[in-house]
Image (tube, rainbow, N blue to C red):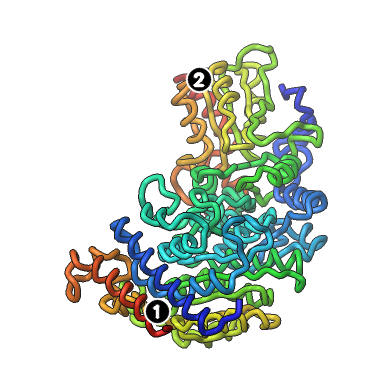
Amino acid sequence: MLNPELKLNTKMFENPPAGGEQVPIRQGFGEGLLAAGEKNLQVVGVCADLTESTKMNLFADKFPNRFIQVGVAEQNLASVASGLAAMGKIPFISSYAMFSPGRNWEQIRTTICYNNQPVKIVGSHAGISVGPDGGTHQAIEDIAITRVLPRMIVLSPCDSIEAKKATLASVDTGTPVYLRLAREKTPVMTTDNTPFAIGKAQSFWLPSNGGNPKVGIIATGALLHRALLAAKTLEPNVEIEVMNLSTIKPLDEKAIIMLAKKAGRIVTVEEHQINGGTGSAVAECLAKYAPVPMEFIGVNDEFGQSGTPDELIKHYKMDTDSIIEAVNKILKR
Amino acid sequence: MELNDDRIVELKEKANNIRISLIESLIAAGSGHTAGPLGMADIFTVLFFHTLKHDPKNPGWPERDRAILSNGHICPVLYSTMAHAGYFPVEELKTLRKFGSRLQGHPHRDFLPSLETSSGPLGSGLSQAVGMAIADKMDHGMTSGKRIYALLSDGELDSGQIWEAAMLAGKEKLYNLTAIIDRNNIQIEGYTENIMPLESLSDKWRAWNWHVIEIDGHNIEEIADAFDAAKSVVGMPTMIIAHTIPGKGVPEFERDYRWHGNPPGKGPTDKVPADKQAQVALNDLRTLGGKIKSEHQ
């Protein structure tokens, strides 16, 4: 059952299988940045010719004097932001995740993280669900390359409302932040009243019998909705706890260890390469403190291709059926 | 301070002392870059002892000018200049590149917070300076008293990011930005025009709407005049192309790209045997110091 304490969107399973109301996660960033700009005069926006696609246009239209258009130049994007931050600004830089933090990784490492400047890197169009644009534009390596950087906070909100909260929370961290966004409309699972804090994992789905779950699912991003659908489908035969891991770094180790100890089996779900991603982060933690059998839902060491988001999610085995399959498989281990 | 003849001699002596200290630090380190630091000593001297608005005893002073070193590998000259300016004791220069030292092999603000940036990977310093200049313009417009200085090498102009930054600086009309290229014609594997031709260099910067000044990078007066002239340029950033001699001050090392990445003792041995290189460099510079003094008297 949905965790009643989190004031989640109870209509999220309406109109199956897609879910109720659907909004792109990037929309939440656009609204969050606008709100952040109104609250804090030091917030500035920098973009590499994708202002509308990344929804930075909401901020740019309202605050043209605090917006810088650098053109298709992602390396410059990162280092200009480093300079802005050195002068006291709180820069948000946006592009497609494939180009930032993809193309400009070394500039992010050296001029932002190593240089300790609190730049917020906003990677839109992350994951395979970018769809028809094809594999060149589907960033499925971005979590791996950002979570490996010292000082970097890595956020992967599950829906537009959480993305807005994550954007606002990023302003005050005093550190570099990577904020991962998706292009497509996805189900809205949270509400304005759902609590959010960087570094805090939350269990959105709990065993309806109040007992310990048989399997714990840890999901990040919009795929969380499919994980919840899987749990809903399997209930009451297999009681599952589903955790929303919207902060991938720093990892909420306490909550993850507790879930592993309760469930004894963990399935991770992410729209990202299995290698080096969220599942790896969870495995690094559990191997040390609470080793349990794990299954990993994600892209298995290959590139994406053109297709509709649903076709691709199914093809790369990240759909609800694949999550159910992983649960059944781990129950036999 | 007025730049009269006495002051020019003082600055020449200062530059020579900075060269001696940086050679001593490289000898103690046993690794590091020699040619670039020696070639840039006159420019660093004028910048830190004549042009820059800064306070070594209060490095975090918000109204200070900002000086960004993009090609971090020439940090021996930055460290030596900062030590002589009073940021930290000159004796500390001998800890260069050693474990626990504030003077990391390439500049790192975590260890030496008075640095404006950490640098090493080439090509990104101009972007950072552009970001700083935009921030200052955003906050203060023409009323700002600050200037942003970016020190670049010619070799790093091979990097595309430099030209991304060049375009943006021109577009944003960053009158508060002065950049300096160390045009010494060498990079680690050879002469710049063989590795990747850069000429016609001044035309390239003009094409991106920069004001360009070309100077002799060892002439104290020309360096100071160029920095001053940049302050009165309206509506565009200024690029000073400083023609320098790599290894300047040690004739046996001058103009030889093989001295780019080696310290005395590990450089090419066809002119000076390895075990004599340290002494030759220090002797040359001390003799030069004496010459500057006697010519003045």
| Marks 1 and 2, how far apart at CA | 86 Å
Q: Chain of mark 2?
A: A
Count all numbered tags in the image, as a single digit.
Answer: 2
* Residue at x 57% of width, y 33% of height: A251
How would you rate the neighbour count of disc 1 (Cα within 10 Å): few for under 14, some for 14-19, many for 20 or more?
some
Q: Position of residue A255 (x, y in %)?
A: 60, 24
Tag shown at residue A331: 2
Using the rendered image, report if marks 1 and 2 lie on a common chain: no
Mark in the foreground, 1 or 2: 1
Q: Residue A204: percent from the left, percent from the top?
A: 69, 27
The percent coordinates of residue B270 (x first, y second) are: 17, 75
Place residue B172 in its image quadrant.
bottom right
Residue under circle 1? B293
In this orientation, which residue lies closer to the viewer: B25 or A11? B25
Name the residue located 58 percent from the left edge and 27 percent from the top edge. A217
Residue type at mark 2: give it: Leu
Q: Residue at x 45, y 41 (%)?
A: A275
Residue A160, can we see it?
no
**x, y percentage for residue B267?**
24, 68
Q: Residue at x 40, y 69 (%)?
A: B17
Instruction: Bin the neighbour count of mark 2 within 10 Å (Cα to Cα): few under 14, some 14-19, many 20 and up.
Output: some
Give SS at disc 2.
helix
Left or right: residue B112 compared with residue B244: right
Determine the chain carrying the residue at label 1: B
Indicate the secondary structure of the residue bearing disc 1. Answer: helix
**Amino acid type, callout 1:** Lys
Which quadrant of the figure contains the C terminus of chain B?
bottom left
To which quarter of the image does residue B195 belong?
Answer: bottom left
